[in-house]
Amino acid sequence: MDVVDVEALSRQVLWAAFALAFVFGVIAQRTHFCTMGAVADIVNIGDWSRMRMWALAIGTAMIGFNAMVAAGWIDAGNTFYAGERLVWLSNLLGGLLFGIGMVLASGCGSKTLVRVGGGNLKALVVLLVLGISAYMTMRGLTAVWRVETTDQVALALPGGQDLPSLLAAGSGWPVPTAAGLLGLALGGALLAWALASAQGRSADVLLGGFGIGLVVVAVWWVSGRLGYVAEHPETLEASFLATNSRAMESLTFVAPVGYALDFLMMYSDAGKRLTLGVVAVFGVIAGAAVWALASGSFRWEGFGSVEDVANHLVGGALMGVGGVTAMGCTIGQGLSGVSTLALGSFIALAGIVAGAVLALRYQIWRLERMA
C-alpha cells in the first residue's frame, strides 16, 4: 500500500480551505450576507430579503452535504455535530447567549471577520474579545463552568443525533438513502420558500445564498474527502487532516478565532500548527478586504461613545462563551451543523434566533422609552 504524504496533503487541505474562505469573504462583503442583519431586517422593517438569502444558503448546504452522504463520500457521524450525546441545554443556552451577543456586537462571528476586512476597528476589538472568551470556554475558567453545568444535561442517542441516522434506525432504511431523501426534502423546501418571492430571486440574494451554501459544501468535501486518510502513517488510524477537532469540519467562526489567537501568540512553539479553522479565519478577512478595497467600500470606523464600546465588549464576550457552549455560531451551527441535519444544530440555531429577537426587541423598547 502506498504511504500517504501527510504533510503535503495537509498543505493541500489548508490552501483549499483558505481559498474557499477567501471566496466566502468576497461574497459576504459583496452581498451583505449576515444572519443578525437578516433577523434585524425582519424585526425592524419587515424585510425578508436577507432571511431568504440565508434560507437559500442552508438549503444548498443541506442538499450538498447529504448528497455526498448518499454517494458514500462522507459520513455525518464523522463530524462533531452528529455525535451520540445530545447536549441540548448547552446548545440552547449557548445559542441564546450568542444571539444576544451578536446584536450587541453588530454582527455574528463571520460578519465580524468581514467587517474587520472592511476597515472596522470596532469589529477588531470584538474579534479579540470573542477569541479570548472562546478560548476560555474551551480550556479556561468558563470551560470548567460549562462542563460542570450545562454539559451535564444530555440525552444519549445511540447511532447518532442526525435525522438520517434516527430515521434509518426506525425504518430500517440505509443511512445514505435516508440522508439523500431528507436532505433533498428539507433543503428543497427551503429553496422553494426562498425562491417563491421576488425578494429571493434578486441577484444579491441568489449570489449570497447559493454562493455561501456551496462554499460550506466545498469545505465539507475538502475536510471529509480530500483530507481523509484511512490509515495515518504515525497513528495507523483513520484521520481527518488539519482539523482542531480531529473530526471532519466545515466553516465555523468562534472556536477557530480562539485557535487563531493562540497560534499567533504561541507561533514559536513547534507544536502549534495551522488548521482548517485558523486559515479560514484569515481567508475570510482577506477576501472581505480585497473586495472592500476593489469596490471602494473600505472605510476606517471606530467607536462613537462609551456605551458603544461597552455594548461591543459585552457582545464579543457573549459570542465567545455562547458560541463554544452551543458548539457553533450562525455559520458553524446555522449552516455547517444544520447541513448535517443534527438535532443539536437545530436547537442551537433556534436559540441563536431567539436570543437575537429578544435583544432587538429590548433595543427597540429602550429607544422608545428614551423618546
Image (cartoon, grey):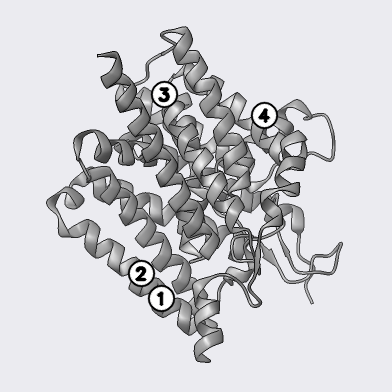
* Amino acid tagged 3: Gly
Q: Which residue is mark 1?
A: 182
- Mark closest to the chain's N terminus, 3 or 4: 3
Q: Nearer the viewer, residue 157 or 125?
A: 157
Q: Quadrant of residue 94?
A: top right
Find out whether the residues at labels 1 and 2 contact each other: C-beta distance under 8 Å: yes
User: Which residue extends farthest front?
Assistant: 369
**Which one is in front in this view, the residue at disc 2 or the one at disc 3?**
2
Q: Residue at x 39, y 68 (%)?
A: 63
Where residue 95 is drawn, which disc sits there?
none
**Which one is in front in this view, the residue at disc 3 or the one at disc 4?**
4
Q: Quadrant of residue 58?
A: bottom left
Q: Residue at x 44, y 19 (%)?
A: 119
Assign a secondary structure to mark 4.
helix
- Mark closest to the chain's N terminus, 2 or 3: 3
In this rendering, would 152 be left or right of 123?
right
- Mark closest to the chain's N terminus, 4 or 1: 4
User: Which residue extends farthest bottom?
Assistant: 172
* Amino acid tagged 2: Leu
Q: Nearer the viewer, residue 81 or 277?
A: 81
Residue 104 point in image, percent of width and height = 45, 27
In this rendering, would 228 be left or right of 4?
left
**CA–CA distance between discs 4 and 1?**
38 Å
**CA–CA distance between discs 1 and 3?**
38 Å
Residue 139 point in image, percent of width and height = 77, 40
Q: Which residue is mark 2?
A: 186
Assign a secondary structure to mark 2.
helix
Residue 26 makes an appearance in the image:
no
Q: Which residue is mark 3?
A: 118
* Amino acid tagged 4: Ile
